[in-house]
Amino acid sequence: MTWDLRPTRSRSARPRVLCVDDEPVILQILRRLLDVQGFDAITCNDPLAAVSSFTEGAFDVVITDIHMPGMDGLTLMRALRQVQPELPVVVVTGHGTVDTAIQALREGATGMLVKPFTGEELLAEVRRALSAAQMRYEALQYRYLSPVLDSIALTLSTAIEARNLETGEHCRQLGVLSERMAGVLGCDESQQMTIRIGGYLHDIGKIGIADAILLKPGKLTESEMAEMRRHSEIGAAILEVHEAMSDIAQIVRHHHERWDGRGYPDALVGTAIPLGGRIIAVADAFSAMTSDRIYRPRLTMDRAWAELRAHTGSQFDPEIVAVFEQVVDEQGELRPLDPALERTLSSDIHAPMSGTDELHARLAILPMLDPVTVTVRVAIEDCPVATDGEECAVMASGEGCEIVLAADTGPVAARSARQIA
């Protein structure tokens, strides 16, 4: 089994290990053991040469002996760390120099090997060093990248609002709800960030949809519906051009997939849908149903909850709906979470959350348009909540709407009903 470090600092296909020791036999053993386990091992028997040729990012980990002529392992570690401060270094020592090795650990060495060591001990120590370095790297990346991505995401969501006024604060609310659900599910802070920003940007692809379709108050034609549904693919294409946004792009692409495989764009089924996509699908539907739209006022909380629960197991992942119930109460208010999680969610690197009153009043100034009357031929699926002739609010919260018809009306029956896009 090879060791997979994602991503390697050296950007090579295999993690690169620099082995420094004045004993050729030790270097030969190190190279052989590391090579067969998927590492790219580079050996050097002169610590001075190792320092002179070392460049930042060239290696993912260094293994060095403590006692060597010309330069000891501690001095070597300090010299290399001047070039690459977060470089993981494993020191190798004999039984008689354990105290020196302990000093090395105190000075920041990542790990220690005592001669004679087994192949398992070597590999375990190298893997441990790489894992620790990866965790530090991801923690720093999260700490510094999160505010930047938040700023970009909120700026882009403002652009969405400029195109389609009904989704402005909805995007921000969706990010908050999705992040809290991810926290309840035990996702780490980096995953929470990814899902939060996926919520902010879930509809960014609507920037690429023509106004005639995006702002049409009536029912979309089949071709218009197909174009509208492209927004998830457009959004993913916008985001995936940058490596830092690749995971967010996958959430944006798949937030309209369905648990039963009848969603779009890829008809993924069950857990094949990315977790962030499943989370945002639930939060998106509820937020949209309880938000004012230019074609209708928000639904009552009872109706919204009924629609959400009625489509659990078909449109929505049942586990995610259960988590949503832990985050939002029956009145639509946020439930208090575990104190430790609340502290994390309210930390400086998380975007500030709007108050409930602001969320509910966000579209109060928008005028209401007159209802649009159209002819509806057939509904895609029955809705156990909506009555005959009404819209299925869960499906209406996405792109397009299906009107619930009585089973005996037939596929060509005409029914006049208010329809939404």
Image: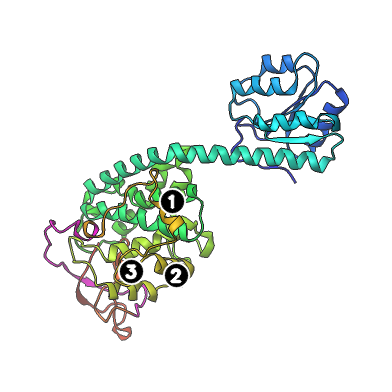
- Mark 2 residue element: helix
Q: Which residues are magenta?
A: 359-384
Q: Tell me the mark number nearer the camera, choosing from 1 and 2.
A: 1
In the rendered image, which quarter is residue 374 located in? bottom left
Whether residues under marks 1 and 3 lie with C-beta atoms below 8 angstroms apart, the answer is no
CA gap between label 3 and label 2 equals 17 Å
- Mark 3 residue element: helix
Numbered badge on residue 332: none
The verdict on residue 377 being magenta is yes
User: Which residue corresponds to mark 3?
Assistant: 394
Residue at image coords 32%, 53%: 227
What's under tag 2, amino acid-wise? Answer: Ala
What's under tag 3, amino acid-wise? Answer: Val
User: Which residue corresponds to mark 1?
Assistant: 344
Residue at image coords 40%, 57%: 178
Furthest residue toward front: 99
